Amino acid sequence: MTTLRKQRLGTCYYPEHWPRERWETDAALMAEAGISHVRIGEFAWSRLEPEPGRYDFGWMDEAFDVLGAQGLRIVLGTPTATPPKWLVDTMPDMVALDDRGDPRRFGSRRHYCFSHQGYRAECARIAEALARRYGTHDALEAWQIDNEYGCHDTVMSYSRAALDGFRNWLAQKYQSPDALNRAWGNVFWSKEYSSFDAIDLPNLTVTEPNPAHVMDFWRYSSDQVVAFNRLQADIIRRHSPGRAVSHNFMGSEIAFDHYAVGADLDIATWDSYPLGFLDRDTSDEAVKLRYLGVGDPDLQAFHHDLYRACGQVRNGQSEGRWWVMEQQPGPVNWAPFNPAPEPGALRLWAFEAFAAGAEIVSYFRWRQPSFAQEQMHEALLLPNGDRNEGWHVCKKVAGELNALGAVAAPERADVALVFDYESAWAWAIQPQGADFSHLDMALRFYRALRRAGVSVDVVPPTPQAVQGRKLVVLPSVYAGSAALANALSGGDTHLIVGPRTGSKTRDFQIHPNLPPGPFGALTGVTVTRVESRPPFAPVALDNGTLFEGWREFVRHGDDVTVQARCADGHPAHLVKGRVHYLAGRPDARLADSVVRRVLADAGIAPLDLHRDVRIRDNGAIRYLFNYGPEPVDVSPWTGKGDALLGETPLEPRGVMAVRRA
Amino acid sequence: MTTLRKQRLGTCYYPEHWPRERWETDAALMAEAGISHVRIGEFAWSRLEPEPGRYDFGWMDEAFDVLGAQGLRIVLGTPTATPPKWLVDTMPDMVALDDRGDPRRFGSRRHYCFSHQGYRAECARIAEALARRYGTHDALEAWQIDNEYGCHDTVMSYSRAALDGFRNWLAQKYQSPDALNRAWGNVFWSKEYSSFDAIDLPNLTVTEPNPAHVMDFWRYSSDQVVAFNRLQADIIRRHSPGRAVSHNFMGSEIAFDHYAVGADLDIATWDSYPLGFLDRDTSDEAVKLRYLGVGDPDLQAFHHDLYRACGQVRNGQSEGRWWVMEQQPGPVNWAPFNPAPEPGALRLWAFEAFAAGAEIVSYFRWRQPSFAQEQMHEALLLPNGDRNEGWHVCKKVAGELNALGAVAAPERADVALVFDYESAWAWAIQPQGADFSHLDMALRFYRALRRAGVSVDVVPPTPQAVQGRKLVVLPSVYAGSAALANALSGGDTHLIVGPRTGSKTRDFQIHPNLPPGPFGALTGVTVTRVESRPPFAPVALDNGTLFEGWREFVRHGDDVTVQARCADGHPAHLVKGRVHYLAGRPDARLADSVVRRVLADAGIAPLDLHRDVRIRDNGAIRYLFNYGPEPVDVSPWTGKGDALLGETPLEPRGVMAVRRA
Amino acid sequence: MTTLRKQRLGTCYYPEHWPRERWETDAALMAEAGISHVRIGEFAWSRLEPEPGRYDFGWMDEAFDVLGAQGLRIVLGTPTATPPKWLVDTMPDMVALDDRGDPRRFGSRRHYCFSHQGYRAECARIAEALARRYGTHDALEAWQIDNEYGCHDTVMSYSRAALDGFRNWLAQKYQSPDALNRAWGNVFWSKEYSSFDAIDLPNLTVTEPNPAHVMDFWRYSSDQVVAFNRLQADIIRRHSPGRAVSHNFMGSEIAFDHYAVGADLDIATWDSYPLGFLDRDTSDEAVKLRYLGVGDPDLQAFHHDLYRACGQVRNGQSEGRWWVMEQQPGPVNWAPFNPAPEPGALRLWAFEAFAAGAEIVSYFRWRQPSFAQEQMHEALLLPNGDRNEGWHVCKKVAGELNALGAVAAPERADVALVFDYESAWAWAIQPQGADFSHLDMALRFYRALRRAGVSVDVVPPTPQAVQGRKLVVLPSVYAGSAALANALSGGDTHLIVGPRTGSKTRDFQIHPNLPPGPFGALTGVTVTRVESRPPFAPVALDNGTLFEGWREFVRHGDDVTVQARCADGHPAHLVKGRVHYLAGRPDARLADSVVRRVLADAGIAPLDLHRDVRIRDNGAIRYLFNYGPEPVDVSPWTGKGDALLGETPLEPRGVMAVRRA
């Protein structure tokens, strides 16, 4: 399989939406804009198979020909996110049920239940038909399976198929109801089951169900996504040797284990909508206003680093192949408010991704449709086919990429931040404080690292992923293991351990040794009490920083130094050798100070970046970005290498590239 | 049919709620208060037909006699908003289903599905029985069909009857599934249908359904209201010649096309609750506090002007017969908070309606019931039968009307503001910015016009309605047509075109020429991008005003002058001859300045009213109102005519009438 | 039956959660901490009866033996709040349906419908089995029936069983549909029924159902709780003579009549979670922040006084036996945020309860479970079995109790505050102003009384309960009766009547004489209008205080003095002899001033307590509490008796006890 080293641009195209006579024009305009890759087909089932069993590949054949004639490389999507009406009508129980038990019906997309075996068979059939027909086509570069797993809250289904599947999954896992009862603690509230067939899905209960019950259902549901994806991946690989298999993940989506899906992919891709995501961010209104037209300076970057870890996962580590499959090209249609990108933002986003090692940045979509749900989603072309701003940005960026000779050059970073899907589930299931989440905890540390100008790998909580790093951060990793603790305890690795880390067993029980469980020896602390506090009641530390919303009361050994205390005297920041334990959720100033100190200890000199500036190294090039509304003198951070792109002071929303020293 | 010219008072009476021996007292008290019209019967089905097919008209006969004996003119309501339990029990599927598919059961009111043919037949039966019995009664002035269509969100039903009806309606409209697929753009997300019987109602979808699908369902649902109403109107006209047919519309209700229902009515009436409505208004808290006891100075007036356009619609224009059928008489029971009217407010409301040409202002209700849902809703009499404040206000206003010789004298206004129900649906279905609505847009311009002291007709988007006006305002009219554009382009008409106008086709697609579509030539602009922004991020204009939440990026021709720009340089207010295009949602200051300038251009001198003062001309009389808490010198706006009522300075919540010059 | 005079400590223990070999250690640790009482068994059905009809009492026998061997007195809970899965599977319709008609399924607790006769029979069976086995065991002190009726909104069920039961209940109450139609006022909106079988439950209606319909359904539902409880009480008394019967009520729970359930109990107990409750309080953020770690200084105390009225109710009055069955021992798991108690808070809570006459304060729970829903709920022991803070507090408090020789000595207070469950339902069903509630009204007066240092009995609205008091407060008692008015009109009783009192009949109709109905002669006022106002629009009084959200317009007789007026001149505080009428919802300053004046009139000198200080007399001891974060000089309020505990200045969260003069 070819690895794409040269960094290129792509777009998402729906030939079936436009008159046949327009296609050549579109292909020529793509080429003119410097676009090399084009994704097609991922919602076209009703055109590929207009009636049960009657395939119509003629138009797709032509699309391959027209696009291929311009030298465009095709990513073909399997259309399984949009089963056609005739298919739903033949098996009405293929739709998911929501947590009230109501069917989630046809009329939009993703109207299927991952557990439904009949639907899986249909997906295998259409995927095989496509793979047989196009698997070895010259113009075919790669595959995309389905589209945005989890979008619109579609991982969980409370259907009969899910119930049957879940019971079977539990029986496989636990082998006996007694074992399950013990693992879940079902003696509590007389919830003991005498048969796997007595277990319901964890919805519609009077008050909260057993968190262990929910956790297993989330695991089961995630496993169904993995199995659903693998089924198509295996078929495609059989018929399309040498072509990469991908899926386009989403932002801030945690309902399934992306590492596990990624293990079956060659390339992880994701769909990056910086302005649409800003609203989800926890920043305050002043921050939202500052970055309204450019997006959160760190959120996209975090996902770049996360999805770099989801491509080609082998033995717990990633080969790092990743793309942005959908890049926002203008205002979108799906956020409560949909502002326009500031001038420069589209270009900045592209280079942020390339700087993080993306092989392709692909704009969604080529031409704005005049019809249906996404008619207000901008594109590279206007609805009438004229060039829009995005087209011109593509052309410019394509030229700049060529001039830079930019190549994807992911390296293993010295710093690893653990992001763990099961931990995200654990705190969603049992937050204990209403605003506690694993993603938020991870972002607090990620932002501090990025403000220090440091390259970070976001990684799963595996021994392989953390081994040999200079600094590892465990932000609220719910369980952990002896193997992970072991991998962290040897060598020179510095470690920052956030609150709640190691507090649970994998059975969703409090660790028998009390938190931080497997990390007790490493950290030298024992947590005896936790409290969550409302936003108006943070806990002050003696160094002027804050714990926001979460604070722990700990005992510690004699070999532990208390670096900072809460105002009421309880230890806040404890240090044992190279291991730091934070007994609360740090505000930005605390996260910064801890991260900068430990970086320095680990021999990584932290930078002191301007609030709007971010930097990123890729191969021989250092990129600097100005997310702010005013020009910034970036000379302190350029190094001594030649300027390749842009200049200082760096313009608002501007990009600079310099040769690394 | 007699047109009521003399302006009179009415009330709403429920003889079935009170002992028979009280009726004469009530009738005498009504007459004493100067009340001439009384509505009865509209919720009395269980008394008119206590068992299936057994009518009991005796008590109603007596009520006609008792009321008629006092010279009271009766408006008889058909009781179809409250089908009795025995009827629901004979056809349980007559109730509507909500958007979750749950039945909306018996126990309050409006528990029926407009699409249910069996229920329609029952309505025809009871309406015919009433029309036969009372259609030619001497005391009968008019009919009211049903009560408050749409109240409690009852236009839409997701029942089997609605599904069947909708499929048939679609088949009639599109003739072939392919035509429908093309119109809706169903190729998007593989939503194509091969049969009309495959189409579901647009509820319970995984994410938003196709907006064109929803739009057609709203049209279908509105058509059912029209048909439901027409069925009874036709029966009544057959048996009750010469009596006016009416329905009482609501405030801020947009779920069906009121013009279309109005086409089958002789008189439009509406139910005006200024304090209950204040909470729905978008004004800020300071404004709410200022007008807590008197209501929004413009919202009632807007509805007066709107419903004047819904009576006797013939050939796209209204004859202008309208009433207030229910006027708030004190605190109500249904808003989250229900304050008391300030002293003077009841009288002010009555004269505002008369000034806008109302034939009747009818207080709801005569006597406060001590029982059931509305027991906390005040009335002209206290629950114990004593006179309440409202009774005394009636008596006073009746005397003043007589002294003024007030008559309803609607005239065609020079200024027309287009309000379009399909546009209201379009932006409810696809707001793109969470706070965008057609009613809000219309009110922004209406307020500016009213603050300038100008009389306004609110009209549908028809050529007839706008023809020959001096100024026409199109606030976010989603589609438009060549005929409308044509009617606006000739002559001396000045035109203000708001954002989003002409942006869609009637198939809910972006106009192929880009917005403003049919108004492109008139305005000289082309919209290439729109953005919606959160409330904390308005767009500043170079003249110090704001675009709030919505802004467009436009190209324009050489014959267009840019009157104002956004701070970032994009055109904001563009002028081509007599046509003004506003590329955003104006704040109050911008709306004022644009409206005042264009009024002046159109030869209508704008007044500069005090913030609390409003004026209105009706026939020979100019009315001035002080909505504020302090006396105001209104002499700048009285003209030179004789004072007929009140004096300047005008007391808080006071009314002044002067003879027009 | 023994009355426990000596005040003691208890805990809640789940032997079934822990290894058999640990039990002796636990019992010894309890004894060491000075704990004398232990509740067991209330969720253990699946262990007591693992399969249908197969009882397993062996482990429970051993638990009795182990605990009894340490001299611990056992409270045995019937496990009917957690029916096991096999039981639900045999009668799936035993679960409640929510107001959408969806089943509330197995998987947590309280998954039963009070109306289900089959489930009741099962409860009788298990209760009888337990009562036969343990009813005369030497170690058995008392029984608890079920657990926390109403928790998780479980009083109301919209099941078939409830529908059948409700219809029958209505038939018994009204005897004829006509009588019901008249009582409910069903002529309104044609809601008349010709048969009891035609009446639905009041859910899923299009808009609000008839409030009289809802009121009767709430009464019916409350009656089912009473009947459910009585069934087990009767069985237990048959088999367990001399042992007290109790139930553990909740905080702020109003969905059933606690006095009526209490009539069948010997001891009322309740579950006190001061920090978990703080969030529900109406106080502002500054107050919440001040008391974040100690809880509202008045809310727990109010419930102590309320539940003292729910134990052994005989002839409308209580014998006053009450316990805290569950006392918060640390952070809990169920509030949105769960802060840690401040140092001292656990001890303060215990003494507040003892000062209010509690016989037992029992900490929930003994040891924190590592599994299932409540794993984050702290306990006296840590999850690993080590002593936690609460254990040490127990030990300390036990010693202090002994030293004090503290005994429960409830006395009849001079001041009675009426709290009435039907009134709470009335205002929940028809608030008229969104924030109006009976509990809030009661608390406004309760806080003022407690700030004045006065002992208060919270009582039902019965003649017996108010007879002979020096001061009675009626805060928004919806109905009242001639008998109650009579009991209040004779003698020296001073009376404060709040707004809405007497405004309704028991049929949920406005009183025919207008409000305050039966209290019209006493108060000399007649209410002709009410208004509710949003939070930003309070009504100012001429004395600088406020009516918040609710204000009435009243007429009054010549023998009434207007003590204060609203700024617009309407009477606000009216006095007729010893009777005060407040025509609005008082802010804290108004409540304080009225209460203090009337107390003085009644010969009860009000104290002027520091904002953080509260006092309470029990028998020979006066207790003083400092809820604040700073030491307070409490010497002005200690009296001249010897200090028994603590000292002044009183430490933060501190307790002082002095001998009463």
Image (cartoon, coloured by chain):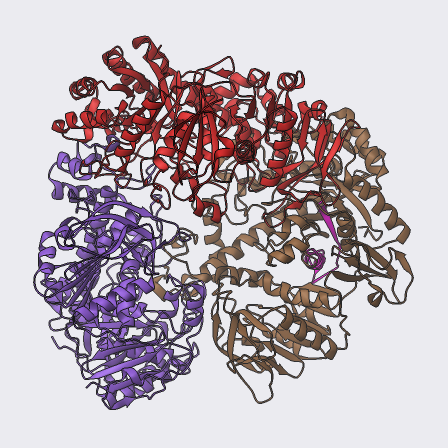
Chain colours: A purple, B brown, C red
Q: Is residue B316 visible?
A: no
Counting every numbered tag in the picture gives 0
> Quick one: B507 or C384, which is closer to the camera?
C384
Q: Is residue A611 left or right of residue B444?
A: left
Q: Is residue B311 magenta?
A: yes
Q: Is residue C342 visible?
A: yes
Q: Is residue A349 left or right of residue B634?
A: left
Q: Is residue A516 left or right of residue A591?
A: left
> Quick one: B90 or B83, which is closer to the camera?
B83
> Quick one: C159 or B178, which is closer to the camera?
C159
Judge whether B33 appears above or below A476 on screen.
above
Q: Is residue C158 magenta?
A: no
Q: Is residue A593 left or right of residue C29?
A: right
User: Could you tell me residue B644's position as x and y percent?
Assistant: 90, 57
Image-quadrant location for residue A58 = bottom left
Identify the residue at image location x=13%, y=77%: A2
Identify the residue at image location x=40%, y=83%: A631
Considering the image in quadrants, where does the N terminus of chain C appear?
A: top left
Judge whether B172 appears above or below C348 on screen.
below
* Residue stretch in magenta: B300-328
User: Could you tell me residue B565's position as x and y percent?
Assistant: 56, 81
User: Could you tell me residue C543's position as x and y percent?
Assistant: 69, 42
User: Could you tell me residue B547's position as x and y percent?
Assistant: 56, 72
